[in-house]
Structure formats: C-alpha cells, structure tokens
Amino acid sequence: MRVWAMAVAAVLTVAGPVAGCSGTSGDNSPPDATVTVEATGEPSPEPTEAEPTQSQQTKPSIEIASLPVGGVPEDGSNCNPISWLAGEIPAGVTIRLGTPSFDPTGVFEVDPSGCRSDAQTCAGLEWTAQNTPQCWVGFQQIAREGTVSLIIPATATCDSQEVCDTLETLGGSQITLTALPPETPLETPSSG
C-alpha cells in the first residue's frame, strides 16, 4: 500500500523566450499563454479490512402473553379504555403493546369502529416509567352468549433480566366482557 506524504502544486509563468522552447509554428516567438502545472498525489486509499465491530448493547426482552390492564367502557359503548394496572413501570423498561384479541375467540371481536375516530389505538403503543398513555380497544359481540377476557400481548425491553423476570409475574388482563342475548321485539297477538 502506498501512502503519499504530500501533494505538490507549481505554477510556471512564461514571460519571455525560454531556452529550448519554441512555438508550434516554427517561429521563435514566445508562447502567449500562462502554463499551469499541478502535481498532486493520489488520495490515500481507504482501508480494505473490515472495521472492528462494536459490542452490541442488547437489552434483555420478554414476550408478555397478557398485560395487567383494566378499564370500563363509558355509557355502554363498545370501546374499552386500556390502562396499566401494575403500579409504576420500572425505570429503563419499555413495554410495546401488541394487537388486542379476545380469549376465548368467537364471542367478541376487535372492531375499531366501536371507538371514536380520534381514540388512541393500543397496537404499537409504548409505555415507559415516564409515560403510560391510555389507549382504547373497540369491539363487537358476535355470539349470543359467553364471557371473554381482553388480551393485550406485549414485548418488554428491560435494563436487566431480573427486571424482565419480575414483569412476567404481574398477571394478566382484568377486562372481561359478557355477551348479552340480543333483544327481540315483543310479538303482538294476531287478531282473528
């Protein structure tokens, strides 16, 4: 590998006849131009070996099947507010909420139209020690009867495995929904 120590630049100005130089036409008159000569070294080549890798700063993380959440719909709406119920989230922990679902399936299903259009959805929301914003899950009943739990899975990233292990023991959702039989109109006796 060659490394050039310096770059050289020189400017030569011709003002009169220079011994040994002549014009191209064969006469002895001096050239009318200023000649500039620049000599520069080639740039230093980039190293071809791989840069050393930096140590990866991975933090422990865990999948939580169901967060400890709660909330009660207001005014009989089909939109459930979701709040963290397990006290303060430890410093250095980020909890990323997953896609809500119901367990068992087939009684209720997630339906965002049950909430106002400006309601914060839960999927992808992150909770930290400094910020646990409320979110909402819209739903609709699809069976005549049954009771379900609203499940919100999450991924927790922690400063230590010990903190993550503690989060796994916090329990799950405290939100349950019970299907109500649909109301049928009263039949009127037929006359006759």
Image (cartoon, rainbow, N blue to C red):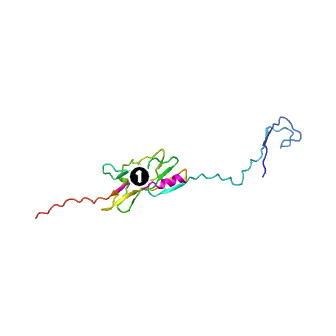
Question: From where the camera sits, is residue 62 visible?
Answer: yes
Q: Which residue is mark 1?
A: 69
Q: Nearer the viewer, residue 38 or 183?
A: 183
Q: Amino acid at mark 1?
A: Val
Measured as percent of width and height from the top left, residue 5 is found at: 79, 44
Marks counted in the figure total: 1
Callout 1: SS:
strand
Q: Residue at x 51, y 49 (%)?
A: 93
Measured as percent of width and height from the top left, residue 163 is found at: 52, 52
Q: Furthest residue to the left?
A: 192
Q: Assess disc 1: are there few (<14), some (14-19) or many (≥20) residues with their C-alpha within 10 Å of its C-alpha.
A: some
Q: Residue at x 36, y 56 (%)?
A: 176
State yes or no: residue 101 in magenta. no
Measured as percent of width and height from the top left, residue 65 is found at: 45, 58
Q: Quadrant of the C terminus?
A: bottom left
Q: Furthest residue to the right?
A: 19
Measured as percent of width and height from the top left, residue 177 is found at: 34, 56
- Compared with 91, 110 (above or below) is below
Question: From where the camera sits, is residue 37 visible?
Answer: no
In the picture provided, is 182 more to the left or to the right than 187? right
Q: Magenta stretch?
A: 161-176
